[in-house]
Image (cartoon, helix red, strand yellow):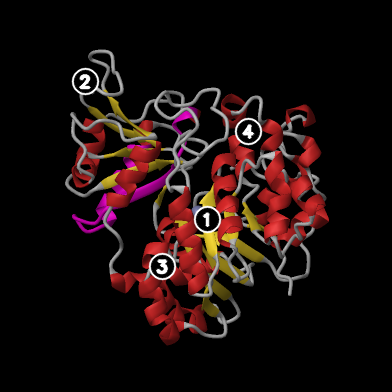
């Protein structure tokens, strides 16, 4: 993540209360305990960091690391799988690349994830092999290198052993401490156990913080059944979350038009829900008097959510679209007409500028149209909310303020801004982080 410090947009913080509208609190707690690789300048230093961590850990404890920047090393290759296995042994081990689009896994971790030499690439992901013979996506040859990308990296991460239940309170307390500049935090994929554990952690570690939980729709019934036991003045169930598409970086966000460099099998990305499933999700939430929070990144997914809400006409307020990174011109005013909240994370623009130019060269003017959303009637802090998606990126509001006002990184010339017409003012951007009645 580019550092916003020193840029004109990193203006003084306001005195009103701030909200982080899209966080993953438990994952942040986990990431705070991971081995930090951002200081490593070579593959050898990465191996040293793991060797040190292994000495300090029990033999079987997983070794999880983040922050590797191979492209900034003199030799930009990840260490070999054999070398990584030598220092990590039988403990499952993985090292995330700083942007979470790739990771290096050892053999024990790959085995846990069920990946071997013959495993085909998953949709939206790639499993790297040694180049003994030319690699083609569907007929893997050569051997695993341990490096996996995008959806394959997420698959490996999901197979990593979770911290024990008894560690949860400490991890949550550390995460809340890291987010202590926010008066209100929304968790957008709340585990069914999160409410009960936060109910015990909040009074001691963050008594002034309000937390709002959005479990996955499939966990909603279980969460509804327990909510009376853990909801409090500063902890409540906010709604349910669904995933309507993938991500721009893996070209799996659901687009109205093909990507310039899309996947041959899915040139417009990969819808993850049908219109009928979406309407059903809207109905289920409305019946529980809760809003739906729909992950929709591409303009196709955004439209599908708006269509479902329009068709069903829920009576519950607060339905929201998470991310909404690309919005077709025809859909901007529908947010206001349908009362749908745009919950966006402008900070991602800072790291995605190059990828966006490659993927959407002729649709760049539709990326985060913040100026249009406000001009159409979205109210910052009420129906236009800012967040970060921490720990995917850091939760420093200055990053989103910079992205929303300058539409580029602080070290870029103004001419490289992505659609500067969509910039908003610093006051408007801070207001989108503000808690309004
Ligand atoms: Zn998220």
Mark 3 to mark 4: distance in Å? 33 Å
Contact between marks 3 and 1 (CB within 8 A): the answer is: no
**Which residues lie in the magenta part?**
46-71
Give the mark nearest the N terminus, 2 or 3.
2
Q: Quadrant of the C terminus?
A: bottom right
Looking at the rendered structure, which numbered label has been put on residue 141? 2
Looking at the rendered structure, which numbered label has been put on residue 353? 4
Mark 1 to mark 2: distance in Å? 39 Å
Q: Nearer the viewer, residue 402 or 215?
A: 215
Q: Is residue 107 rendered magenta in the image?
A: no
Give the mark nearest the N terminus, 4 or 1.
1
Q: Is residue 169 left or right of residue 393?
A: left
Q: Position of residue 315 (x, y in %)?
A: 60, 71
Q: Quadrant of the N terminus?
A: top right
Q: Is residue 333 left or right of residue 169?
A: right
Image position of 222 with respect to 321: above or below: below
Mark 3 to mark 1: distance in Å? 27 Å
Mark 4 to mark 1: distance in Å? 24 Å
**Residue that appears at 59% across and 46% down:** 303
């Amino acid at each position: 993540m580019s550092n916003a410090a020193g840029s004109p947009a990193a203006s003084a913080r306001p005195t009103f209360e701030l909200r982080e509208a899209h966080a993953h609190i438990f994952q942040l707690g986990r990431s705070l305990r991971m081995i930090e690789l951002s200081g490593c300048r070579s593959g050898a230093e990465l191996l040293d960091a793991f060797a040190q961590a292994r000495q300090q850990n029990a033999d079987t404890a997983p070794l999880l690391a983040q922050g590797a920047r191979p492209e900034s090393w003199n030799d930009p290759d990840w260490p070999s799988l054999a070398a990584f296995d030598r220092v990590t042994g039988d403990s499952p081990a993985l090292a995330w690349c700083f942007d979470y689009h790739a990771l290096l896994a050892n053999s024990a971790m790959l085995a846990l994830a069920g990946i071997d030499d013959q495993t085909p690439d998953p949709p939206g992901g790639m499993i790297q092999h040694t180049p003994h013979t030319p690699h083609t996506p569907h007929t893997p040859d050569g051997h695993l290198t341990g490096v996996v990308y995008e959806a394959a990296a997420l698959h490996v991460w999901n197979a990593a052993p979770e911290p024990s239940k008894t560690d949860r309170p400490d991890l949550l307390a550390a995460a809340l401490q890291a987010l202590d500049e926010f008066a209100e935090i929304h968790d957008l994929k709340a585990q069914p156990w999160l409410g009960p554990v936060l109910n015990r952690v909040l009074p001691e570690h963050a008594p002034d913080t309000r937390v709002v939980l959005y479990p996955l729709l499939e966990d909603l019934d279980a969460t509804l059944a327990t909510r009376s036991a853990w909801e409090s003045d500063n902890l409540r169930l906010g709604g349910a979350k669904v995933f309507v598409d993938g991500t721009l970086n893996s070209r799996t966000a659901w687009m109205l038009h093909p990507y310039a460099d899309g996947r041959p099998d899915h040139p417009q990305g990969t819808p993850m829900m049908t219109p009928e499933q979406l309407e059903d999700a809207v109905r289920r939430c409305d019946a529980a008097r809760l809003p739906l929070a729909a992950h929709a990144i591409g303009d196709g997914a955004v439209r599908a959510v708006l269509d479902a809400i329009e068709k069903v006409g829920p009576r519950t307020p607060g339905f929201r679209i998470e991310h909404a990174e690309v919005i077709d011109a025809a859909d901007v005013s529908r947010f206001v007409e349908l009362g749908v909240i745009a919950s966006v994370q402008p900070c991602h623009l800072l790291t995605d500028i190059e990828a966006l130019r490659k993927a959407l060269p002729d649709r760049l003017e539709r990326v985060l149209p913040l100026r249009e959303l406000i001009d159409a009637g979205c109210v910052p802090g009420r129906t236009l909310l800012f967040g970060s998606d921490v720990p995917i990126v850091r939760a420093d509001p200055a990053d989103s303020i910079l992205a929303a006002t300058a539409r580029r990184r602080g070290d870029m010339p103004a001419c490289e801004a992505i659609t500067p017409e969509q910039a908003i003012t610093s006051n408007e951007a801070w207001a989108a982080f503000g808690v309004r009645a």
